[in-house]
Image (cartoon, grey):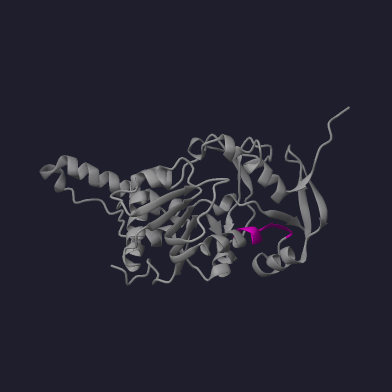
Amino acid sequence: MLPLVTFQPWREAMQDALYGAHGFYLRERPASHFRTSVTSGPLFATAVRRLAGRIDDALGQPDPFDLVDVGTGGGELIAGLPDVPDRWRLTGLEVGDPWPTEIEGLLFANEWLDNVPLDVLFDDRVVEVDPFGEERLGATAEPELLEWCATWWPRSRRVEVGLGRDRAWAWAAKRVRRGAAVAVDYGHTTSNRRTSLTGFSEGRQVAAVPDGSCDLTAHVALDSCAAATGARLMTQREALLALGLSAAKPDRSLADADPRGYLALLQEAGAAAELMDTRGLGAFGWLVQAIGVDDPLTDSVP
């Protein structure tokens, strides 16, 4: 007798495949499968350190000052932060870790929201999927899902519903008593909305199969998330420029006076160019929610 094949809504299937007993994120290190801004080199951590420093100063340098890294993976971001004061309390959060009840400082979530499970609808019906990636149509979606679609993803038969991401972002931002919550992710807005659910394994894009063998991800509806908390939405290029990063190459004349220094500056410019490339990482969105302080990424900040 053939085993019974179980179909689930995509949201439930993603939850099990990523975070269940045999889930991808309980067995694998993300850095082994895909490259992010955090794992691209030390420059991104330097930028986050500058951002945290601005927030720390705006708060009057409290003791402790919290820096919470959501979806920390192998802890690369926290490990790469330069010149961290002793009073800073660094916390990396992964699946199953208890969240701080109250944060005074910076909550930073890099490529976390894209892995928050979502519902998929087709003609207002819930799309169900089995462990092999085969789909079928289920019942008509709940009114709150349909309302989200009407507001944020109209005129499309197949929709990846971002309501769960909106709620996850709002819940995370509320953990910050004073300071800022920042989420960085690839995504889209109503101007370029498109379906994108896919898988990644060992650096390659693969079919979205919810069997725990691969990462499952979809672009984040960044405008919807921003509206959920009133956050400001900007590109990574804009954010890193505001934090003082520059992709400008150093003056060639420095090569003769200080060859090693010139090479170091050239490498830094190359790393900055990758992080700010609008055809890649530079197009990522930053959701910036300031709580009890001025926006740390406004143009007025030196």
Across and down, in percent, residue 47 comes to 34, 54
Across and down, in percent, residue 290 comes to 44, 68
Q: Is residue 64 left or right of residue 124?
A: left
> Which quadrant of the structure image shows residue 242?
bottom left
Across and down, in percent, residue 241 comes to 34, 60
Across and down, in percent, residue 293 comes to 39, 71
Q: Measured along the vertical axis of the image, is residue 122 above or below residue 210? A: below
Q: Residue at x 33, y 54 (%)?
A: 87
Name the image quarter holding the N terminus. Answer: top right
Q: Measured along the vertical axis of the image, is residue 51 above or below residue 86? A: below
Residue nearer the viewer, 26 or 164: 26
Q: Residue at x 24, y 47 (%)?
A: 265
> Which quadrant of the structure image shows residue 179?
bottom left
Q: Is residue 69 left or right of residue 18?
A: left
Confirm whether the magenta stretch covers residue 53.
no
Q: Is residue 189 visible?
A: no
Magenta part of the protein: which range? 157-165
Residue nearer the viewer, 197 or 4: 4
Q: Is residue 8 left or right of residue 46?
A: right
Residue sitting at the far top: 1
Q: Is residue 165 visible?
A: yes
Q: Residue at x 63, y 38 (%)?
A: 23
Residue sitting at the far front: 63
